[in-house]
Amino acid sequence: MKSILLATASAALLGMATMAQADTTIELQRFFGACDADYGSVTDVSKAVGECGIITSLVNKFEAENPGIKVNVTTVEWPGYNQLNAQLASNAAPDVVSVHYSAISDYSTRGLFMPLDELLASAGINPDDFSDAARGGVTKEGKMYALPFDNWTMLFHVNLNLMKEAGLVKADGTPVLPTSVDEFFAQGKQFKEKTGKPYLVQIYANETAAYMRIFYTLMMQQNYDFFKDPMKIDLSGPEAKAALEFMKKIHDEGLSTLDMDYSAAVSGFSSGEGGIEVNGTWLIGDLDAQSKEAGNALSGGYTVYPVPQFFPAKDATYVDGHGWAVPRGDRDDEKMAAIGKLFKFLETNDFEWARTGHLPAVKAVFDMPEFKALPHRDNIEKISRIGQTLPDGVMRQFALQDIVGEELAAAINGNKSVDEALKRIEERVNDLLGNL
């Protein structure tokens, strides 16, 4: 009897060992914050809100539906590239990482990210499933280096209550927004005279990205190819000067809040300190929720639109996005198949991620009744068609963001002339790109 029991126990242990060996673990590293206390066990994604809650619940649901695959999540502080660089240098990179489209070239050009075309095809993911803006963002030299997850950009978040006070709301309840530089200043002046408040709420302090994103948008609207050579920025054209002079005039004429950092700008708009906040897609959910509550500056009076077309040459806006990349490393077929399953799951559930306010990467989501029912999405869906990234060969875009933003801020705040700031951007950017 004892030998039978031992044999049975041995067989059970052998079976458990076989099952353990059959399990596959995906090491996934991401930003989007940590919220395990609230969502660590949530698998009903519809109950989740916000970037962290939704991505955490999505991973939980994937694991529940795929019991043979474990996703071990490591959360890094935004944007996480210093940590990733160290991991790649020590050959200890995770299997999957969250990445901005603007950072992909830094890795793909050095062979540090895997091209994913074969993996996506084996998982049943068709590149044609994605919007032009999303697919373009992850495609470098004809190959896809990440699974597109969204597009995001800067928007005009509008306080309709203050716009009504300024006489800038149409009979149908939609805001009157400018369609040219001249209209912007006429409407901005009217708003300030009627309300006593600045037209725009902007992030001016401790900031580089917001300056850069609007500057790129204004040049794109003039159809100016300022990175015709991806290794050299050219701001010698009149388009660059027109864009920066526009931004500076907004400051000089008192049509924007001043000296606000990111947090102050968000809270300032929420408390009614200006008519239009220039900020990202990720705020839509929170601001819409505030507008549905009583007794605050946005009660019953919030909407959102793309940055208006100020220049006639082209309807365009600078966009970036989030994707999922696979760093260089040795992985067996089982691991790669598990990653393919995860990517297919994320593509299939792109609507859930779109509830964050980011635009879907998957074209079919735009036609879903559930998506159309989300607030304000019909106002901004065109960004998936007009959104532009920088050319795919432009490297070190996060570093360029700091250079461009610093110099733009110096000109806008009067510490440098417009010409001097544009010249310094060229010198600093081209020095960086010329010494990679």
Image (spheres, helix red, strand yellow):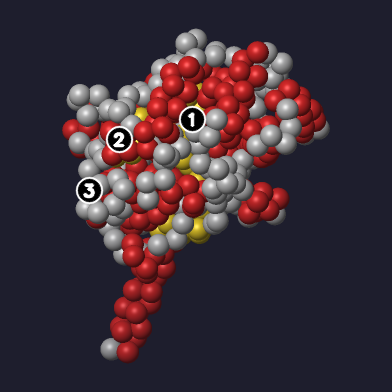
Q: Separation of disc 3 and disc 1 at Cα? A: 28 Å
The local secondary structure at tag 2 comes to helix
Q: Is residue 115 above or below residue 30?
A: above
x then y, percent, for residue 295: 25, 54
Q: Residue at x 37, y 50 (%)?
A: 271
Kind of residue sitting beneath label 3 = Lys
Quadrant of the rendering where the N terminus is positioned: bottom left
- Mark linked to residue 165: 2
x, y percent for residue 395: 66, 31
CA separation in Å, label 2 and label 3: 20 Å
* Local secondary structure at mark 3: loop
Q: Name the residue tied to disc 3.
A: 292
Q: Which mark is residue 319?
A: 1
Disc 1, SS: loop
Q: Are there few (<14), some (14-19), or many (20+) residues within 10 Å of tag 1?
A: many
Kindly report which numbered mark, 3 or 1, lies closer to the viewer in this rendering.
3
Q: Specify the amino acid type for callout 2.
A: Glu
Residue 333 seen from this side = no
Q: Earlier in the sequence, mark 1 or mark 2?
A: 2
Q: Nearer the viewer, residue 102 or 339?
A: 102
Mark 1: amino acid:
Val
In the picture provided, is 300 more to the left or to the right than 337? left
Residue drawn 60% across the image and 29% down it:
248
Q: Can residue 254 be seen here?
A: yes
Q: Quadrant of residue 409?
A: top right
Which is more N-terminal, label 3 or label 2?
A: 2
Q: Position of residue 425 (x, y in %)?
A: 73, 29
Which of the labelled discs sits on residue 65, or is there none? none
Q: Farthest residue toward the bottom?
A: 2
Q: Foreground mark, 1 or 2?
A: 2
Q: CA distance from mark 1 to mark 2?
A: 32 Å
The reply to whether the C-beta atoms of the residues labelled 2 and 3 are less than 8 Å apart is no
